[in-house]
Amino acid sequence: KLLALPEAPSYTSDSSTPTLIFNPPSSAPSVYHTPLKFLPKEDKRRQLYAAAQQHANTAAHRRQMSPIAAPGTPLSSPSFLPPRPTSALPAPISEPYEKTYHLSEEDVAEIRRLRASDPDTWTRVKLAEKFGCSQFFVGMVSKAPEKAAAVSKEHEDARRKWGPRRKIAREDRERRKVLWGRDA
Amino acid sequence: MQRISISRCASQLRAPRRPACPCAAANSVRRSTTPHSHRIQARCQSTVAIPDEGGLHLEIAANSGAAATRKSRPSSQPLPLEKLPSPHPSAAERSTKLHALRSRLSLPPRFPLQALARTLVHASADPNPAFNNASLSILGRHLLGYYTSEWLLCNYPRLPMPVVFAAVEAYIGPKALATIASEWGIEAAAEPGGEVDSGLLQFKRIASGDGLPEALRRQAPWKWNVTTTHKIMRTDEFGSTNAPPSPHALQKTPVPMEEAAQSFVRALIGALHVHLGSPLVKRFFRDHFLSRHLDISTLFDFRTPTRDLSRLCAREGFEAPVARLISETGRLSRHPVFVVGVYSGKDKLGEGAGSSLDEARTRAAAAALKAWYLYKPVEVTVPSSMEGELDTSKWRPNFVDCGEVIV
């Protein structure tokens, strides 16, 4: 038995009156189109956006309906399933997490004490695991200047050993990174 | 706006030209011939000085080196035109270039060609402030700066100040004005003098091989500790770090052509304002300056767009931005493409594509910030449109933003 699919929308219209067919190629959205959330409350385009979104939703629902359950037939009324709840957002790159503010003054003092006592054993990673915070936070509250100097000296020595090709490639990479914030 | 009459401003049409006009000497010799213009004859033979031109007398006397008396020219020899620093105003009517320029710019015929000729004379060509374009260029510069910055601030209310300064410089900066002058077909005379065509741009050129003169090179900064507030309140319309030399100070210095062209465009705006009134200047500005295309989104330079966007969402009360991977291809190949969108809750704020996840996320955040800053209201009325208007019903209050994101 054939699956009852609604017919695809045609790109040529049947009516003789002039219609507008808008079929743009896929491209990056323009920065001159302000998203709805960024519009100030007084802007009239908010109503237009809301109306356009509603129209799109009803059009989508209309196309989803199979001809068996079209309005006028006995099966039309609440016979189609509601739209799936929005797990429609794409997957995040890194999972968002709740920030926790559980560390007290004594914990912070303890972090500082441990880090100052032996930076090589009590690294940022280890302290972050112990206290359940991020490494960034550990680095923010406690400083280890000698360790930092030693590490940066190691990095400098490694960079000095680079040949010309690697050096140029790395410098180009830095320049390209600056352009990310400029051309987008 | 009340029109200032020509007699108050265009002093070169009233002042007797010093040294004496060539027509006077010629007429005194050949009395049988009728002079070609009664006005010129009367003007040249007049020896009465205008009261406020007393300073000019001394200046000219000092320049010519005479102690207290003016040199008396033998009346048999007419003064050669080469001795004059710039063409006589009467030569303006005979210059085809000026006629052509006036009609090319679609200026009404009531705009005097003498005024147009004056705007083409830079201070380095003629030190007399009544005959060069220095004072008109000061007026025109302020008018241009006012109209441009007001248009930008009203049409893009959320733009950060450095971007506003950059946009103003792109519209009416020195290089833009020099380009506009060359688009208008302004040609420059090789050497300034009284014999050149009035329709040529006259300025003293820098000798080949020489560097920039001192006046243009060594400019003291306004202040050593510059903040944005200081740039807005104290510096010029471009927020520049150094004070440019005053046009009157460039009287003896050779200048590059860019500086002369810039002074011409500004002086033209000033002359239009004086002779034709501000409604025409506004239309002229809209037709010749605002019609130039500038993509403001290229003027941004974000260093940490992800952090800025996160602060912006916190400030405005939106949900924290999350970067989501919309689509990708070629992840393990040499040229992957990741398309990442930055979402606040369910709304997409910006989208960016890149060859690494970090790059795509950064570009998406930058796009979102630009979408915030480049907001443009639908109905925009600028304050200068209400100048002198009795009917203020068309006025729509401008959108005032709280400012850029501070991190």
Image (spheres, coloured by chain):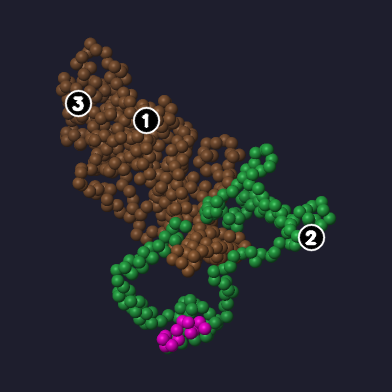
Q: Is residue B229 left or right of residue B313?
A: left
Outermost residue, top side: B32
Q: Are marks 3 and 1 on the same chain?
A: yes
Q: Is residue A80 left or right of residue B293?
A: right
Please tell me the colour of chain B: brown
| Mark nearer the viewer, 1 or 2 | 2
| Mark nearer the viewer, 2 or 3 | 2
Q: Which image quadrant is residue B263 in?
A: top left
Q: According to the image, label 2 marks what residue?
A: A79
| First reached walking from the N terminus: tag 3 or tag 1 | 3
Q: Is residue B268 left or right of residue B329?
A: left
In depth, the one of B128 and A108 nearer the eye is: A108
Residue appearing at x 41%, y 81% in the figure? A144
Residue appearing at x 65%, y 48% in the figure? A10
Separation (CA) of disc 2 from disc 3 = 102 Å
Separation (CA) of disc 1 from disc 2 = 76 Å
Q: According to the image, label 3 marks what residue?
A: B80
**Letter of the chain that mark 1 sits on in the rendering:** B
Q: According to the image, label 1 marks what residue?
A: B101
